[in-house]
């Protein structure tokens, strides 16, 4: 009886662990989509700040940060803080550094980070029309990445959940 | 580094700032211009002339001088625009950015022209940091000359000087004196309004005058003179309107409107004498009709900004100021 109880407990633990792993993978896919959509929204907010309020870049970043969730809010707020602190680096370098800082806490992949870092090219260094065109280009790249991320989520979200559970069950059977 | 140079230094790239900090040249307090030109010698202009600095801050020949590169110019623009060049469309069109302290940084590069008008500059490869220095009191000894005691008002006045002759410095101080009042001369101040088309009189930064133009002075910054005078007339109820470098037909027409509205005009014009101004049709008409009541001719005889002659245009008399000093006046 004791042996059965232990085996049952062990089996449940294995299945719970693999199911949790599968759930984590599934959520990461969903979170990546959400964060890409947030970044897309943040660029539109930044365009509005540049076009309508002509806010200086650090203050535009602060205004955008207030409307986002972490980690993207930290991308903008850290960049703003460094710009205001008299940092000797260029706005582009500050942006890239802030992007690198949030990478470990995000669900973005390497290709996404290239797009995000690319948004910093000529940031604050050109007149309005060129600035908005650069943001528009980044939005286009984001659109493609978002489409692929959504497709991946649709295909693989359920798969990971089933895989997590089924994998755990298979492992239990093997061990038994 | 003195206060003024610290103000300007905040908007210079680090390398250039370091060079100036190590400079063995004339005191920074005498520097009037710092010129950054891509690939060409770093040049400073002061009272004693032009000189070039090496990377170690030594005065050298042009051939040995430090030459700002693209990164220096880029960094300078980033500092000048707070990393927000997109927000400086007007400045890019006008060709200068004013920074805190009233210092003006001229921009030079490739003009972008649309429908025959410059809309902005791009590929900026030259920056000219013009250091603004206010000389308080330069107009004080002469304020009495511009007052009409009988009618308790300021006379319509014209300051005439050749380029770099000190007329803007004098005008700024005159505006300050008229606005703050001069107790010894018996007046407490007039409501003064300044049309500062090129941000040289008040050196405004984000609409706030950085130079002292008086406690009762309203400043309309970066506004064309003629339009600015009309705006101030309609909205700010001035007793005196001050503006710099008049000459165009629009300026003349606006001045006539201001005068007919009972507001005093104090303006400046380029030239070495009234006779020279008469060669310009618009100004000739104003002088012939005795619109201006007082004129001061500035020159270089004792350095820039020397008041050489004071002219009472109503009485058609003039006094040379090179041998005498003005006296105190009675109560206004």
Image (cartoon, rainbow, N blue to C red):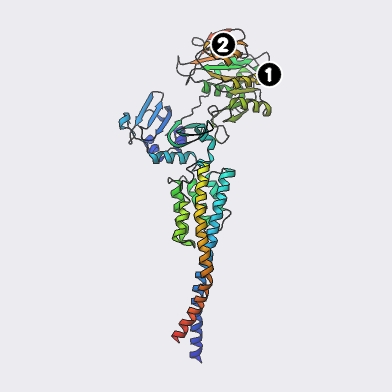
Question: Label 2 crowding class (10 Å Cα cut-off): few <14, some 14-19, many 20+?
Answer: many
Question: Label 1 crowding class (10 Å Cα cut-off): few <14, some 14-19, many 20+?
Answer: few
Q: Residue at x 43, y 49 (%)?
A: A93
Distance Cα–Cα, label 2 vs label 1: 23 Å
Q: Is residue B265 left or right of residue B27?
A: right
Q: Nearer the viewer, mark 2 or mark 1?
A: 1
Q: Earlier in the sequence, mark 2 or mark 1?
A: 1
Dot 1: chain letter: B
Nearer to us in this view, B321 or B327: B321
Q: SS at mark 2?
A: strand
Residue located farthest toward the front when viewing the structure as drawn: B115
Nearer to us in this view, A152 or B46: A152
Q: Is residue B100 visible?
A: no
Residue carrying label 2: B311
Nearer to us in this view, B58 or A40: A40
Figure check: A74 above or below A172: above
Residue carrying label 1: B260
Dot 2: chain letter: B
Q: Which mark is residue A45?
A: none
Figure check: B99 above or below B259: below
Q: Is residue B226 visible?
A: yes
Q: Residue at x 52, y 43 (%)?
A: A129
Residue B256 image offset from top left, x and y in percent: 64, 18
Question: What is the quadrant of the C terminus of chain A in the image?
Answer: bottom left
Q: Residue at x 53, y 46 (%)?
A: A132
């Amino acid at each position: 009886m004791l042996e059965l109880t232990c085996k049952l407990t062990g089996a449940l633990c294995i299945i719970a662990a693999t199911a949790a792993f599968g759930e984590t993978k599934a959520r990461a896919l969903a979170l990546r989509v959400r964060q890409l959509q947030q970044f897309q929204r943040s660029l539109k907010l930044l365009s509005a700040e540049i076009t309508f309020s002509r806010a200086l870049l650090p203050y535009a970043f602060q205004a955008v940060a207030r409307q986002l969730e972490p980690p993207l809010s930290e991308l903008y707020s850290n960049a703003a803080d460094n710009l205001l602190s008299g940092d000797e680096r260029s706005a582009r370098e500050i942006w890239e550094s802030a992007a690198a800082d949030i990478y470990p806490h995000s669900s973005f992949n390497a290709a996404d980070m290239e797009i995000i870092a690319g948004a910093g090219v000529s940031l604050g260094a050109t007149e309005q029309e060129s600035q908005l065109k650069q943001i528009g280009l980044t939005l286009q790249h984001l659109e493609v990445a978002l489409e692929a991320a959504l497709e991946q989520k649709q295909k693989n979200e359920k798969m990971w959940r089933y895989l997590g559970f089924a994998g755990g069950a298979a492992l239990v059977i093997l061990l038994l | 580094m003195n206060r003024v140079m610290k103000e300007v230094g905040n908007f210079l790239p680090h390398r250039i700032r370091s060079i100036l900090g190590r400079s063995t040249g004339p005191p920074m307090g005498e520097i009037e211009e710092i010129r950054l030109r891509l690939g060409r010698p770093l040049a400073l202009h002061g009272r004693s002339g032009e000189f070039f600095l090496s990377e170690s801050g030594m005065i050298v020949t042009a051939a040995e001088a430090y030459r700002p590169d693209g990164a220096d110019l880029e960094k300078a623009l980033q500092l000048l625009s707070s990393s927000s060049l997109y927000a400086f469309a007007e400045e890019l069109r006008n060709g200068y950015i004013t920074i805190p302290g009233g210092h003006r940084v001229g921009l030079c590069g490739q003009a972008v022209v649309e429908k025959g008008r410059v809309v902005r500059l791009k590929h900026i490869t030259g920056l000219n940091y013009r250091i603004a220095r206010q000389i308080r009191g330069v107009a004080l000894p002469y304020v009495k000359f511009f007052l009409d005691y009988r009618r308790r008002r300021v006379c319509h006045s014209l300051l005439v000087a050749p380029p770099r002759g000190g007329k803007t410095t004098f005008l700024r101080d005159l505006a300050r004196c008229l606005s703050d009042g001069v107790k010894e001369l018996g007046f407490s101040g007039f409501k003064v309004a300044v049309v500062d088309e090129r941000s040289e009189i008040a050196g405004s930064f984000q609409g706030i005058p950085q130079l002292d133009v008086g406690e009762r002075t309203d400043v309309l910054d970066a506004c064309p003179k003629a339009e600015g005078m009309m705006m101030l007339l309609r909205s700010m109820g001035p007793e005196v309107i001050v503006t710099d470098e008049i000459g165009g037909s629009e300026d003349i027409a606006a001045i006539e409107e201001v005068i007919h509205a009972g507001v005093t005009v104090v303006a400046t014009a380029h030239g070495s004498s009234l006779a020279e101004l008469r060669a310009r049709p618009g100004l000739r008409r104003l002088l012939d009709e005795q619109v201006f009541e007082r004129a001061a001719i500035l020159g270089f005889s004792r350095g820039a900004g020397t008041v050489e002659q004071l002219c009472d245009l109503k009485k058609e008399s003039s006094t040379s100021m090179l041998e005498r000093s003005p006296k105190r006046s009675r109560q206004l």
